[in-house]
Amino acid sequence: MTTENATENATENATQNVAGTFVPVCALTDLAEGEPRKETVSGTTIAVVLSEGEVYAINDTCSHGQVSLAEGEVEGCLLECWLHGSQFDLRNGQPVSLPATDPVPVYPVKVEDNTVFVHI
């Protein structure tokens, strides 16, 4: 499967998510180390992040500033909101710096045959 086909299939399948299933989101090769990628799965906007060889999926909306986390910077397992600087742990969504005090949802991820799947 080519990267282009994987992306097309992910887009088509994202609208067909059934509760309790993993949905293809993008090709692993579509992800650049430390650069969040915004995706929408079943109406939920997420940031998909490849960091230190691991792939993470976190809700794209900062719990403090209501802005896109996919526009932020990644440092290890932390994703920083670009607006006010809150950092969120990609593994559990917990804020590790102020001003955010509420976590954001994270989602299980699996990678098979170069395709990233997310469970919403």
Image (cartoon, rainbow, N blue to C red):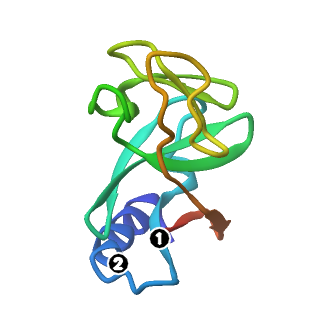
**Total number of numbered labels?**
2
Residue at left offset 39%, top offset 34%: 70
Q: What is the CA distance from the residue labelled 1 to the residue labelled 2? A: 7 Å
Amino acid type shown at disc 2: Asn
Q: How would you rate the neighbour count of disc 1 (Cα within 10 Å): few for under 14, some for 14-19, many for 20 or more?
A: many
Marker disc for residue 13: 2
Residue placed farthest to the front in the image?
A: 101
Marker disc for residue 6: none
Residue at left offset 34%, top offset 72%: 14
Amino acid type shown at disc 1: Pro
Circle 1 — which element? strand
**Is the C-beta separation of discs 1 and 2 under 8 Å?**
yes
54 or 18, nearer to the observer: 18
Q: Which residue in the structure is indicated by mark 1?
A: 24
**Vertically, is 54 above or below 3?**
above
Q: How would you rate the neighbour count of disc 2 (Cα within 10 Å): few for under 14, some for 14-19, many for 20 or more?
A: some
